[in-house]
Image (cartoon, coloured by chain):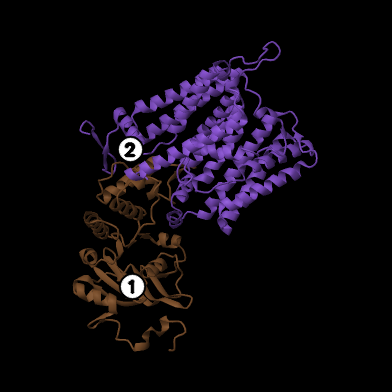
Amino acid sequence: MTSMTTFETPGGVTAAKPTVAGHVRDYLARIRGGDLGALPAVLGLVLLTLIFGSAEPETFFSAGNFANLFNQAAGVTMIAMGLVFVLLLGEIDLSAGYAAGVCGAVLAILLTDFGYPQPVALVAALAAGAAIGLVLGFLVAKIGIPSFVVTLAAFLAFQGVLLNLLGESQIVSIPDGFIKSLNKDSLPVTWSWILAGVATAGYAVAQLLRFRARTRYGLVTEPIGIVLFRIAGLAALVLTATAVLTQERAINPDVTSLKGVPIAVPVIGGFLVLWTFVLGRTSYGRHVYAVGGNPEASRRAGIPVDRIRISVFVVCSFMTAAGGIMLVSRAGSVDPGTGGSSTLLNAVGAAVIGGISLFGGKGKVIHAVIGGAVIAVIDNGMYLMDFSSGTRYIFTGVILLVAAGVDALARRRAAATGNR
Amino acid sequence: MAAKPLLELRGIDKSFGPVRVLHDVSLSVYPGEVTALVGDNGAGKSTLVKCISGIYPIDAGTVTFEGREVAVHSPRDAAELGIEVVYQDLALCDNLDIVQNMFLGREIRRGIALDEPAMERLAGETLASLSVRSVNSLRQLVSSLSGGERQTVAIAKAVLWNSRIVILDEPTAALGVAQTTHVLELVRRLADNGLSVVLISHNMNDVFAVADRIAALYLGRTAAQVRASDVTHAQVVELITIGRSGNLGLPPEAPNDFADLLPGAPR
């Protein structure tokens, strides 16, 4: 402590002057104090990748499989991103899986039976999602039915809606077009690199602008070394991934060439940036955290608690619809199982594994994406290792338990150290 | 003191169904002074505060602010007049940091994004103006603060908005000795800075330590409002427990004076 110099903030509140060493020490102290964030999920992801990679180096580490992972993860990850909002309020949406199926069916039927143009059908499916969320949110916030019951009822009902929408044919294929490419095709190599460059530069500019704004106000800043380290880390990650994804991965390149970043990547990335901004940098996002932390204090601070509660269900079901579109795009069709079986549980699992608290008030959108990656890697790696689907379910369940266990232990630790 | 009251309540009545909680209550709050609001459990202190802050509508009576009659229908109306209430334990969100809590519901924005540096700076200045220099970081989660520090943040939050009247609901109820002293010093400093402070408290030591005036409620009525220097500890306790003390307080009541409190009782 003696080596730490102090720093006078504008108000005259004395704070420790930030140094790289101090920053690292603070981070370690936070971890020890039980504030783990996404760390267990990231470590788990690395560990699983190493295990599957050493077991099946030929297939698991191939560029084709890497690209495939994004397409596999897309649907569940988008739904998990929406669930983050609902979980932040300590609520749950059990209907998300079949809501995705219903919105996918709306999309497919508008495209085929009604022959709507693709953008119109896309917007209609997303609007259907938002409308579902509005109804669910109204029932929870205004009528006061617990979200568990409301969405459990919706889960059963949407299963039926999906069956009725699909009618006798029971399977509706979607025509070719940009919706079908969304979660199937890849960007051209040039665009892949442009995207990687824009993403890296965008992150760097955002970080540096934040640093400059805080310095200008004379506030405590993170040491510039840490900021640069973060930018370099992201740049390395993005550029390496792009380099791998722009490799030729077609089995027979002479017939059709297959390379470039999957379109699903910018779709997921775009939503990730959008919702991270909304939650972290707008007053709406601040109010979501506040209501999740202490609804009564929020009400007394003049926050419209009911409206916030409804809005998170709207966001969740909207993202569910987006996830449903990705599922349909990947399968090329809708059937009564779309969004069914383990879709919902994988999405909830993704959020929890990523480090989002089921008790509300804590978590970020990136956690859902990392958790979604863990789920996809388990599914993909165990499939490559020829485990039966039964074993895969059991293993996914065990991982979810481990994640929840780590969270529970961390919470106990945090309560002991006063970090909540 | 010749100064005019900043806030004056006259003849406030408030009933919940058949239960009359406030009966002809009056209260005067002066600028630059700490007015202690005392009374036993169920005397109507909290109800009165909720009426002032616009959470409950009043049934009868007048509220005068700076000499003109006002109607306060919602917490927002009260906030516009500059009336801020600091609640005992319901004021802060544990999962947010100090700055986020202080600006909750009234964030400073730049376009659609939050202006974090501006808020952090203002929060720092406000805490400093209250001579708070003990927090490690303004970005500390409120959950990691001690009871006294939390109370300080809650008070700073109320002061941030150029408020005129700060109402504190038992600010020291859950605090230790050192923290209580610190919070009471803060309360005194608010009044010395020219604000009107209403302090609700059960603790006579706290009341006599900081209050300029004492208003005692007894079973929903104003027993007396007196200058703290004019009364003794024992007199205030009598005002709280039996509603009168010597020639102060309510007139001696007839045995059936409680009739209006008991639904269905003969008058």
Name above or below for residue A371 compared with residue A411.
Answer: above
Q: Which chain is brown?
A: B
- The color chain A is rendered in: purple
> Which mark identifies residue B27?
1
Q: Residue at x 21, y 54 (%)?
A: B178
Percent x, y of residue A39: 43, 32
Q: Quadrant of the N terminus of chain A?
A: top left
Q: Amino acid at mark 1?
A: Leu
Classify residue B85 by image quadrant. bottom left
Total tally of numbered discs in the picture: 2
Name above or below for residue B34 compared with residue A177.
Answer: below
Classify residue A68 by image quadrant. top right
Q: Secondary structure at mark 2?
A: loop
Residue A365 seen from this side: no
Residue A203 seen from this side: yes
Percent x, y of residue A283: 47, 46
- Chain identifier of the residue bearing label 1 in the image: B
Percent x, y of residue A125: 68, 41
Q: Residue at x 40, y 50 (%)?
A: B93
- Disc 2 designates what residue? A219
